[in-house]
Amino acid sequence: MTVVSTTGESEISKPLTDKRLYRRVELANGMVVLLISDPDMNTDDTDADGSPSGGGGEADDDMVTDDEEDDASESGGDEDDGGDEDDDEASSTKKAAVAMCVSTGSFSDPEEIAGVSHFLEHMLFMGSKPFPNENEYDSFLSKNGGSSNAYTDLECTNYFFDVQPKGLYGALERFAAFFVSPLCREDAVEREVQAVESEFVQALQNNAARLSQLRCHTAAKGSIFNKFFWGNHKSLIADPTARGLSPRDELLKYHKAQYSAERMGLVILGAEPLDTLQGWTSELFSPVPSGLGPPVTFQGEKKPFEGGWLYKLPLTRDGHELHVLFQLPCLHGQYESKPDDYVSHLIGHEGKNSLLSFLKSKGLVTHIAAGVSHDGDGRNTVAYLFNVTFLLTEAGLKCGEDGFGIVEYLFAYINLMKSKGPQEWIWEEMAAAAKMKFKFAEEEEAQDYVQELAVNLRLYKPAHILEGDYLHEKWDPALITATLAHFDPSNMRVEVQSSSFKDEDFAANPREPWFNIAYAGQKLSAATLEKLGGMAGVQGLDLPPRNPFLPSDFSIKAQDLLAEEREGYERAAAFECPTPEALLAPPLLIWDAGRLEAWYKFDRFFKTPRLTSLLSFHLRGCNATAEGCVLLKLSTKVLEDVLVETTYLADVAGLATSVYSCQERLEIKVEGFSHKLPTLVGEILEGMAKFSPAPERFEASKEFVKRSLKNSIVKPSRHATYLRLMSLQMDAWPLEFQLAALEKLGVEDTKAFIARLLSEAHKQVLLHGNATLAEANGLVSTAAGFFGKREDEGEGERGGAGAPHTKNMAQLKPGQRFVHSALVQNPSEQNNASEVYIQLGPENDGDYAALSLLEQIMYEPFFDTLRTKEQLGYSVHCGLRNTFGMLGFCFVVVSSKFGPLHIEERVDTFLSDFSKTLADMSAAEYQQHVKSAVEAKHQQDQTLTEETERHWDHISMGRYNFFQRNHHVVEMSKLEKQTFLDWYAKHFGQESSEGGRRLTVRIFNPDHKDCVADDRSYSDGDLLNFREEVDVFTKTFKTPQSVAKLVKGE
């Protein structure tokens, strides 16, 4: 008997919107398993032998999120097409996914080999007895449209993957073998230790990682926290070897002592019926060895830290952070009451009367975050660590000694909470919000979903596996009072990280040995602790007001199919695509007059009480000067701050607001439950109309923008991307110009700018979801009332301000090769970064399709060759770039071991060798690649928000090509192998005279500074001169009246 217990579908609480079927089983060997069958996930019976996906291989966590990069325009909505489905007859637009959470982690590391849990996480993938090839797992996944990753936490190690549904069984065979009979190959030890070392070096300048390691170093002696968890070459190779130990033998010993089926939680999400999934599970995972007993608990261990201490350390980027940490007992068993959430809700509140609002009014902070993080650092069987983090302004750092005055205000608020006692109405609001969020939860990405549930399997009761994170079942004021008692000065730890601190300031103190962190620590005096404990109430601090945005109407609207909708459905049906017409059909143009265009789509697919509203203010020409460019960013930040007391309450109630800028646009996105969304949009527009920021809060926002600009290129990978984009965009302004212009701007400039947005900017609106056409027109009409002159009434001329806008891009000439070189911004940075960008030319469907296919074929071998085999660096990836209508392909490597010159040599060698790889590829294998690339374009939107963003990308960027992916599929399907080979040779061949347009960006660490300047290089200050040597391509964007007819309102 392989299954000893079963929890059925009816016993597991799940969201109302969730169509999937669930079953929890326990195998005879003690492994707990959650099986999930998704009836909307298609599969077929053909052999699982697909081809590498553009997202194949181990996932890379170090992707660029640079403030200077307009993500929507850079990716064109296509770099995240992801998802690889299968057969034309039975294509799936969803992925299967699996996660195994092993309940052992870094707490269990033996002293002899620090970081061995992390090391084992890497080595476990290096082959098994049935599948000895170390690349077998990744290769199979990539051939079947999948990807994998893993992470090591303090009390668990989580392994997970996703794959095309038809490849699930084959992937499970390979995955299960890692836990039944892993090889942990001897010849892989040195390479994987180097991978761990590269990961470690990447973290050396990461401020969160530095603070975490300092906490470990200064933890109470004898505490389980007082360890080095990361692992590096010294701890995994040098130190054990010096002790006469074999690193691999120690690894195998650890595996044998810690990995056992009773300590494992497995989640399988697939298309098959639950009985089939259960049969596979019994067959493949019953052989996993057992016998070590249940997961080890560290409850009763010594508290992590001695209370009442203050630590100071430098911040590696510009800014100041204050952290106040409180140690709570383990609250795993109290998840139905969540007393820590009650406290975090109040301390971290951003509405009226809140601690943040009070501190902002004094210009002391720009941000607060409070609570227990969901990772093992924050919550484990030893303790729950409640962290309050403040981002300080310059004035905040001067509030008391190094910001300690902020701690006094914090305790004034804590003491206020204690004196007023637990408030049931506050907890009931929290419970109501959590209940509706769970009831109408949107579907997550498969890989994210299974890894979260794998952790929950052993954390919550079987009935609460899905609901546990949301559950607020029991009002327990006594428990809240007991929890608040731990918020005492004697139980706190204060940490100040500031760029004003220099290493030499702490020269008299010993450094933290692993990260080489300079720091100082001191025990706070009894008088200081007593003062904090007695802090009285402060005028302006109080409990939050009641939340007016909590919805009560969750009804799903009904509306007859409009004739224009039917047209869109018919256009969608013309493509051979598995995506339902209800998803694929474009939104309707319902307003196009004056300076306002509005689009609308009624949701007929997700059928959820949600609505998304997107509003863009496009002030053309504001990027003509550096002042206009940075004024947009500053005004956006100030507006966000002015609105926050309103938008935060809405966010708590399930209505999220984002205010952001990109290029010449300020955009406002509101998404969530539809009931109160029109009210919130009205209040946001009213806030814009009455925009009048307080001087102190304006200065704090200005300081925030200044820091954001400075810090945007501190990371080498972001610095490289910044230089590439700055080179390609002819109207972009270098950071130094923006920073100089920012200094001259004042509060009146932002007031005038917001007023201009309302009166002069071209506005674009998209409403999508649970709203009828009449309701959408009503909301647009209300919004138009804030925009000055009403040109929308009557039969006025369409598109009065809808003339095409343009953008100038650098177009490299055939054979042109440019190099931009720069030193890292942080002199302590050990990493180099290199981007090799090959430009094709203006966007067209043929080249776009070919580039998508190239990414599909090349991604996994590029990663495997340069990262896995050659160990150039931890971050290695390549992919298509669509930069405002200019197509290209980019190769990115971040390395501490090699400089950019060596990296580029290896990239060139790879490109040369890849020509032969393509030529030798069989016709059948090539067609499998084409099929996988086609299916990647067919990935179905998983949530209403995803669909909205896909449509919005075309509207906000002036594309209006809502079927663009389908056109790419048509072109891709025509690509014969020889045609593709000729295309590759033209653009990527070493001897090509027609192509060869290349821009290389090199970011050197200080060890390679002598290589920065050479005869072929521009420095980062020469960008304006570079623009004189290239051609200019002017991208002309479409107008709505050129692509859609106006739908008359009801």
Image (cartoon, helix red, strand yellow):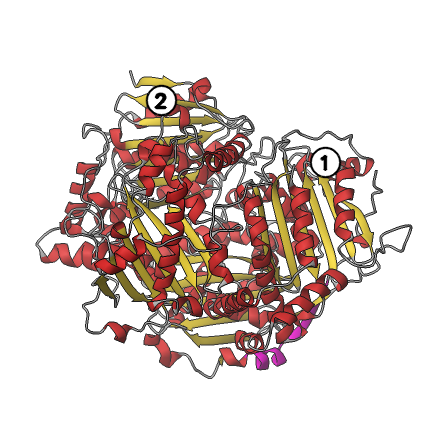
Neighbour class for label 2 at 10 Å: few (<14), some, many (≥20)?
Answer: many
Residue drawn 23% across and 29% down?
A: 294
Q: Quadrant of the N terminus?
A: top left
The image shows residue 927 at horizontal and vertical percentages of: 55, 43
| Secondary structure category for the residue under label 2 | strand
Q: Which residue is mark 1?
A: 573
Q: Is residue 1033 magenta?
A: yes
Front position in the image: 195 or 107: 107
Front position in the image: 309 or 934: 309
Front position in the image: 545 or 492: 545
Which amino acid, by three-letter code, is at mark 1? Ala
The image shows residue 900 at horizontal and vertical percentages of: 40, 70
Front position in the image: 136 or 1002: 1002
Residue drawn 44% across and 35% down?
A: 97
Dot label at residue 195: none
Tags 1 and 2 touching, CB below 8 Å: no
